[in-house]
Image (spheres, grey):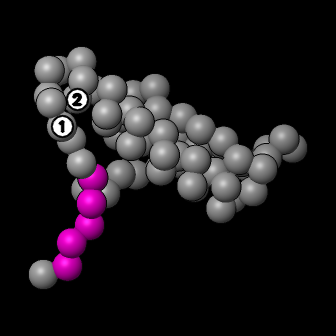
Amino acid sequence: MNYRIRLVETAEGWSASCLDLTGCHSQGASRDEAIDAIRAAIEDWLAVEAEESGIKSAETMEIAV
């Protein structure tokens, strides 16, 4: 699944927010670090949501057909 993110550069570095998942934010010193960090934050957000919903297992992957 694809998620929309917003990247913002400030004097302290880059912040990243997932526009599709409430409260899913992260940051990094560089743009690439912020993207890697928000990717991990999205995976963590989805895992917590699954756990709280009683889902035993959830995986995120990409496949080509």
Rendering coords of residue 20 (x, y %): 35, 40
Question: Callout 1: helix, strand or loop?
Answer: loop
The residue lying toward the viewer, choosing from 6 and 57, is 57
- Can residue 7 be seen from the camera position used here? no
User: What x and y, as percent, mark residue 30?
Assistant: 75, 57
Q: Position of residue 55 (x, y in %)?
A: 14, 28
Stretch of the chain drawn in magenta: 60-64
Circle 2 SS class: helix
Helix, strand or loop: magenta stretch = loop
**The C terminus lies in which quarter of the figure?**
bottom left
Furthest-right residue in view?
A: 11
In the image, taking residue 20 as reference, residue 31 lies left or right, namely right
Tell which tag, 1 or 2, sits nearer the viewer.
1
The residue pinned by badge 1 equals: 57
Rendered view: 34 above or below 50 = below
Residue 29 vertical position relative to residue 20 in the rendered view, above or below: below
The stretch drawn in magenta includes residue 57: no
Please name the residue shown 41% across and 42% down the image.
Answer: 42
Number of numbered discs: 2
Disc on the earlier residue, 1 or 2: 2
Locate residue 20 relative to residue 7 in the image: left or right.
left
Q: Are marks 1 and 2 in contact (CB under 8 Å)?
A: yes
Q: Give the residue number, with chain letter if any, for mark 2.
A: 50
Residue at 26 percent across and 67 percent down: it is: 62
Q: CA distance from mark 1 to mark 2?
A: 7 Å
User: Along the line of sight, which residue is nearer the eye, 18 or 65?
Assistant: 65
> Which residue is situated farthest in the bottom direction here?
65
